[in-house]
Amino acid sequence: MSTPTRRRSLRARLLDAIRGGVIRLTGAWRILTNAQDRLLTALAAIRPGRGATTRIRTATLAFQQALAAFSRDTGAFIEGWAATDLPTVYRDGSLDMLDRGNRPHSRWSWTSRHQSTVTTLTAQFYADLMGRLQEAIRRAQAFLRAALDAARARVTQFDAGSFDPDALRQQHPLNTVIYVNDARHPVETWAGAALSWQAVTASNAGAVTTAYEQLGCTRVQVRDGADCGWQSHDDSDLANGTYRSIDDALVHPSAHPHCRRQFLPHFDRPNPLGAFA
């Protein structure tokens, strides 16, 4: 497993990774939202008469092709994010921990522990993002069925009021992501929250694992926002400045999306010799 070399501060690299990921993910998503706009415009222009069915079929094919492109491009982003971007920020977090412990980077390598940790994380995050993609495809297909039903009613039953582009867009907002509480959030908002959570989690998992394996630490010190809780932002157990066990830090590497949490090495022994046997 290999990753690009490190550049600038850890925070700057994390923000770059998150911003770049959001730009790529939302860019792929625009294929879907633009296709929705084009389909509604095309169907709205079709009037009853000869050729109406053919024009509906043509508009349908164009949407289906765009949906396939959306699936392909978004899937490619997710695969690259999980296979390259997240391992890179994991390694960056690891090397930053060595810097904070005044240890050379030569101490670090993709050991079996690091590989296991990053593989578990990326598999989970890959599944989360792919689940969102599959949900978006299902919603797009439901929108297509609803739009076609309305368009066909208009041209075959002469029901002009059956096709309402604004109502269809409101009922099927493909520029949003639905959360577990049925709240709809703009794709840009969701992408920023999801990718920041994943990047910070991966970076901190690398840092904590390195603190244990390469520095011999059993605890780490938390650097976080003054009001940020440990398990969640509103947790009364405040995180900043506290010392946490390695296991606890691996369970809670981040408290919320856009979390600024970082970990510092804490040496329990006066003269740490490195990784435990």
Image (spheres, rainbow, N blue to C red):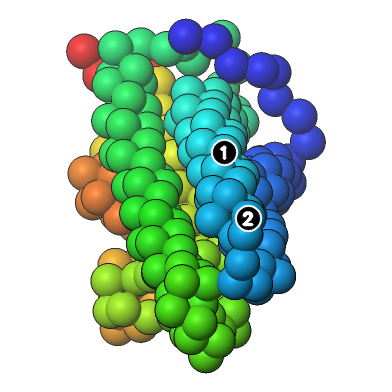
User: Within 10 Å of the Cα at label 1, are there few (<14), some (14-19), or many (20+) other Cα atoms?
Assistant: few
Residue 69 placed where, x, y %?
Answer: 58, 36
What residue is disc 2 on? 51
Residue 253 placed where, x, y %?
Answer: 37, 51
Residue 53 placed where, x, y %?
Answer: 54, 56
**Residue 83 seen in this snapshot:** yes
Q: Which of the pair 219/146 is nearer the observer?
A: 146
- Judged left or right of residue 7, residue 222 is left
Q: Residue at x 34, y 54 (%)?
A: 138
Q: Residue at x 47, y 9 (%)?
A: 1
Disc 2 and disc 1: Cα gap in Å?
A: 21 Å
What residue is disc 1 on? 65
User: Within 10 Å of the Cα at label 2, are there few (<14), some (14-19), or many (20+) other Cα atoms?
Assistant: few
Q: Which of the pair 246/163 is nearer the observer?
A: 163
**Residue situated furthest right in the rendering:** 8
Q: Which of the pair 274/40 is nearer the observer?
A: 40
- Judged left or right of residue 236, residue 53 is right
Query: Toward which corner of the image does residue 213 lie, by quadrant?
Result: top left
Look at the numbered disc 1 and give the secondary structure of its residue.
helix
* Rendered view: 102 above or below 225: above
**Residue situated furthest bottom in the rendering:** 161
Question: At label 1, which amino acid type do we have?
Answer: Gln
Specify the quadrant that holds the C terminus: top left
Disc with the residue nearer the chain's start (2 vs 1):
2
**Residue situated furthest front in the rendering:** 50
- Mark identifier at residue 7: none
Question: At label 2, which amino acid type do we have?
Answer: Gly
**Residue 209 seen in this snapshot:** no
Residue 62 placed where, x, y %?
Answer: 61, 44
Q: Residue at x 31, y 78 (%)?
A: 182
Look at the numbered disc 2 and give the secondary structure of its residue.
loop
